[in-house]
Image: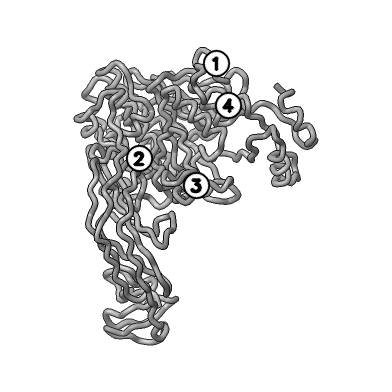
Amino acid sequence: MQQEVSPLSAIPELSFDPLISEEFLPSANKSLAANPFASVFDRYYYSKIPAGADVEQLLQTLRSFPLVEEAYVSKKPELANAPLPNTTPVLPSDDPRFSLQSYAQADPLGTNAPYAWQFEGGDGKGTKWADIEWNWALNHEDLAAHNIQLLPGGTNDGDASHGTAVLGVVSAVDNAIGNIGLANKATPIVSSLVRTGGTAEAILAATQVLSPGDVILLEIQIGYNGGPWLPIETQSAEFDAIQYATSLGIVVVEAGANGGVDLDQYKHWDNKYIFNRDLPDFKDSGAILVGAGSSTAPHYKLGFSSHGNRIDAYGIGENVATLSSTSTASTTGYTDYFNGTSSASPVIVGSILQLQGIAKAKFGVPYSPDEVRRILRWLPFNTPTSDLANDRIGTLPNLQQIITNLPTPGAVPTDTEAPLAPTNLVVNTTSGTASLNWTASTDNVGLIGYDIYVNNDPFAKARSTSNSATISGLTSGSYTFTVKARDGFSNLSAASNSVTVQVQVDPCPAPWNASSTYVQGDIVSYNGVKYQAKWWTQNEYPDLKNDPNDVWTVLGPC
């Protein structure tokens, strides 16, 4: 195999070896010739970067070889949980902790896991799932009965709090101790990414023991050059491994990451918008990408969550009660504060395993990965956030609604029909502000809301769940507005009628002064924005005191 990359010996600083160990390459009996995703992994090679090397120059040199399809620096994956105080409380074994698992309760708070438990397979029986990350306390008192298998090739050593918490959400044993996992009868497996081939190889290892309908959970995120956290499939080897797994019928659930990134506008290092379904650069790995919603209802997007039309569903991203540990040897730890897309993703995994168990028991076969994604995106079946159009993290599974309308595997409906275009767009302007109104659209399944475009920019300037919107902070000039409706499958309508307006920005009044006193009706400017006083005030900063119950009202830019 080394001979295949011999032309690269012209770069003496680098020495190349196959990324994926031969034992984990897809085998002929599992990867049919018709499967286009099985043959890419023997083309991946890696080399360690020497200390002090000019990385960018090495990449440019590599990319200049006709033999090289792509060259990139593989970054170290990081945990996909949000920062928290270090708290790992140990609770009494007879504590009724299920009452703390609000994510399992009925709509609108949770997924309504108990509704599914009353049906055969609704506890995950007959299904398997693999958690891919670092470490786990596999002998925890609420997991030990599973005799969880660690797949070969990786290690399990170090802080196991994260992995143990993930296992607890899905697989805590129904044993009158601690928690109850959402899919407590499913068989859990773990595959460590602490291996030469990293996450991609850990995924391939999992595909060797899983069957169609089973689930892989990717509990990791990556960051580049100090930038925000991104989904692991941003890297090509992991993307290809995910695509291969889904081609085998295995459902892959992926933490959307905690960088607060608008994935619609994320530009890959090859200058492509790979996460934006609206644009031709979009790449679909087949994974279900998960965002993080609040623990309280109505749910809303948590600030750290990735968002955009690529996100398929959200789980609960804060205050999740589950298991915990201080090391791989821990047996009794619990926490009420697991969080991030780390806690959100196993909520989705548990729901999927419950549905797959029911499907296998009722129909004899599970749903395909794409069918699972369609079920999760079907708006009437699931729980929206309070602002679908702006949150853009999908919906939370509502198992009662899904099971009540349970589709047959192989016949899960899809939605390729775009909403009707909005009509009768009208735009009115005041200083630096445009107010838009239009006639509402309709859709065959359900609307998320409306995207508002300005001056032919391919990215929406604003979004709205209703048939009106206000856009402020505009500078003086000409603006052309259009509106498109979007549904739960991210189908976009044709554009509304376009409206062109002239926006003027009024001169700024006298600037606010901390030592001056102001009375009702006084107007000031501060940092390019006009404010009006509601009552007597002094030394109250307008930009900090303009909520509905505060002294200042925002009038707009100047």
Q: Furthest residue to the front?
A: 497
* Residue 248 higher or lower than 135, as above or below: above
Amino acid at circle 2: Ala
Q: Which residue is mark 1?
A: 27
**Looking at the image, is mark 1 or mark 4 earlier in the sequence?**
1
Q: Percent position (x, y) of residue 180?
A: 31, 29
Callout in the foreground (1, 3): 3
Quadrant where the N terminus is found in the figure: top right
Q: Which residue is mark 2?
A: 313
**Looking at the image, is mark 3 or mark 4 earlier in the sequence?**
4
Marks 1 and 4 sit apart, C-alpha to C-alpha, by 12 Å
Q: Which residue is mark 4?
A: 40
- SS class of the residue under badge 2? strand
Q: Which residue is mark 3?
A: 273
Query: Do residues under tags 1 and 3 come within 8 Å of each other at their CB atoms?
Result: no
How busy is the neighbourhood of tag 1: few (under 14 within 10 Å), some, or many (20 plus)? few
Marks 1 and 3 sit apart, C-alpha to C-alpha, by 33 Å
Q: Residue at x 42, y 18 (%)?
A: 211
Q: Nearer the viewer, residue 232 or 170?
A: 232
Amino acid at circle 4: Val
Q: Quadrant of residue 140?
A: top left
**Looking at the image, is mark 1 or mark 2 earlier in the sequence?**
1
The answer, for residue 93, to whether it is visible in the render is no
- SS class of the residue under badge 3? loop
